[in-house]
Image (cartoon, rainbow, N blue to C red):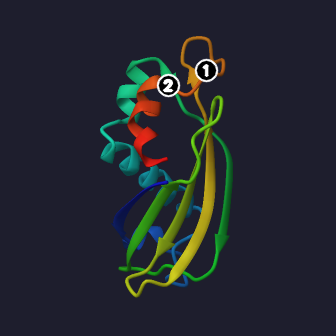
Amino acid sequence: MFTHSTQIRVHYALTDQMGFVYHGHFAQFYEIGRTEALRSLGLTYKSMESEGVIMPVIDLHTRFLRPAKYDDLITVTTSLKEVPENSRITFHGEIFNEEGELLNKGTVTLLFLDAKSMKRCPLPDRIAELIQGYF
């Protein structure tokens, strides 16, 4: 299993009238977590796109357990629990506050697409090589 964590400070613009992070921002937190997890492996979305592979989100599930609040330092933990199959990759995410309380958990599934044809393509060899040691 591959796991990576990154921290995000909740700024005022992310909160609602109650001082809680607006629910729609959690998808963005998961995106930041995925991006930084891939970067930690030496891979960026920008480099994949320049190689002709794009990764649209096809499924997002999230469960809200506790609110994140203004000025919280949250930790987004992103994991690959299984080797990606075919043209799909599923990231598992958890978001914690500074006290270590689980605030949110979810999964995000993306497809690998050839940018020119917009057709599914298999897991790129480069990604397979980077994650193989974790499984």
Question: Which of the pair 17/81 is nearer the observer?
Answer: 81
Q: Which residue is mark 2?
A: 124
Percent across and percent down for residue 129 are 41, 31
Measuring 62% from the left and 62% from the top, which residue is drawn there? 106
Residue farthest toward the bottom in the current orientation of the protein: 99
- Apparent side of residue 34 relative to residue 123 in the rendered image (left or right): left
| Label 1 packing within 10 angstroms: few (<14), some (14-19), many (20+) | some
Is residue 82 visible to us here? Answer: yes
Residue 71's image quarter? bottom left
Q: Which mark is residue 121?
A: 1
Q: Which secondary structure, mark 2?
A: loop
Measuring 40% from the left and 88% from the top, which residue is drawn there? 99
Q: CA distance from mark 1 to mark 2?
A: 8 Å
Residue 111's place in the image compared with 120, above or below, is: below
- Apparent side of residue 8 relative to residue 22 in the rendered image (left or right): left
Measuring 63% from the left and 80% from the top, which residue is drawn there? 65
Looking at numbered disc 1 in the image, what kind of residue is underneath it? Cys
Q: Which mark is residue 106?
A: none
Percent across and percent down for residue 76 are 44, 65
Percent across and percent down for residue 27 are 56, 57
Looking at numbered disc 2 in the image, what kind of residue is underneath it? Pro
Q: Which secondary structure, mark 1?
A: loop
Proximity of marks 1 and 2: CB atoms separated by less than 8 Å? yes
Measuring 45% from the left and 49% from the top, which residue is drawn there? 34
Is residue 23 visible to us here? Answer: no
